[in-house]
Amino acid sequence: MNMKPKLRPLWQRLPIMGGLAGLCAWKALGLPRKILPRDLKSIVNNWDYEMFSMILKSGVLRAFIDQPCYFQQPKVIAPKAEVAPEYRLSHDQLKSFYTNGFIGPFDAFSPQQMQNFRNELLEVENTKSETYGFVTPRDRHFEMPRLWNYMKHPAITERIAQILGPDLLTWRSQIFYKGPGSPSIQWHQASTFMVEDYQDPAIFPPNLNDIFQLTVWVAVDETHHDNGCLRFLPGTHNAIRPITFGGEEGFYEADFSLEYTKEEEARAVEVPVKPGQFIIFTERCIHGSGPNTTDRHRLAFNLRVIPTSVPVYTDKKYYRSVYNGGKYHLDKWGVAVLRGEDRYKLSRTIPDYELERTGVATEVLRPAA
Ligand SMILES: O=C(O)CCC(=O)C(=O)O
Ligand SMILES: [Fe+2]
């Protein structure tokens, strides 16, 4: 089913409204979901009443494209893990993270390390992924022990542990190549990453409102205003916002505008970063990056980190990304332990010793029954 969020004419919106009202009633009445086709089952399973209500009341002009959630500031601001003094976040730093939704930059790697790593990343970025069988910037840590080792750097993991707790997994990485003259990456936000196929979330936190996932974005090249450094709307991680179908904003090939206020936009902050430095943020904080107006590329990579209590993809065989047009078969995919110990074992896991050697993992550990 084509779920692409776009502005549709009334004759298409009316039957969509009828169908969605039916699915909402199906959910409310607790009718058996097994008999529904896959796409409809996903909607009944994953949309909450706020999602149904938004799209129905607006006449299919507005919708939530990720699961709604509302972040409550913690009552007590305290680190969730003990770490070595050099990586400790001060009370003010933690407070600033919870207030704004992002923090950094911090130092992790030397410019020399990044200079050398740059060529390795550029080479891999253009080749077919051994995990998925097509060219994709995603999850190349499964084939690049050096990338995996950089992801595990204590400068990164020890800081994340203070926000998410001591036991950490990574479920996805991505190389961000922004070529000379590339356009901006539009303002966007995500929570459980339902935003990628509009039907199924990728991650299943016990409490949607918690901060259960962080993105770490590492600059390989220096990034500044002219080549499109990251930018944020501080404080917008308080809630997942609805979108309006149509409009200029658009994310990749989707046709919608994310809803935020003029005041929020006026508070936008750009975060220039030196090679080897990184920024930590919650993907729920509205963010993006400007165009690259220079004649040189801007290279970076990110990793997405969750506590071990959060399952990923559960029993999915493949995962769809509407805006990348890709179908990612998950048989060679797994989470990997970044720090601490995985006592829950909720997701398929690639053991560290597999990631430490070259080539795609031959052993993927099954989740605990
Ligand atoms: O690299 C960019 O410009 C965007 C990165 C981003 O959106 C992310 O890491 O979540
Ligand atoms: Fe993002």
Image: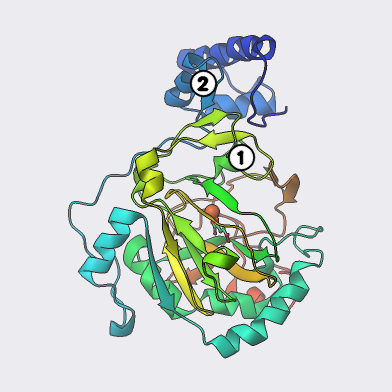
Q: Which mark is residue 326?
A: none
Q: Secondary structure at mark 2?
A: helix
Residue occupied by mark 1: 250
Q: Quick one: label 2, few (<14), some, or many (20+) residues within 10 Å?
A: many
Q: x and y percent of residue 194 in the render? A: 56, 40
Say which residue appears at 66% left-offset and 87% top-offset.
Answer: 116
Q: x and y percent of residue 53 in the render? A: 45, 19
Residue 83 visible in image: yes
Q: Amino acid at mark 2?
A: Ile
Q: Amino acid at mark 1?
A: Gly
Q: CA distance from mark 1 to mark 2?
A: 18 Å
Q: Work out whether 19 lies above or below 146.
A: above
Say which residue appears at 61% left-offset and 54% top-offset.
Answer: 184
Q: x and y percent of residue 131 in the render? A: 75, 62
Q: Quick one: label 1, few (<14), some, or many (20+) residues within 10 Å?
A: many
Say which residue appears at 47% left-offset and 12% top-offset.
Answer: 29
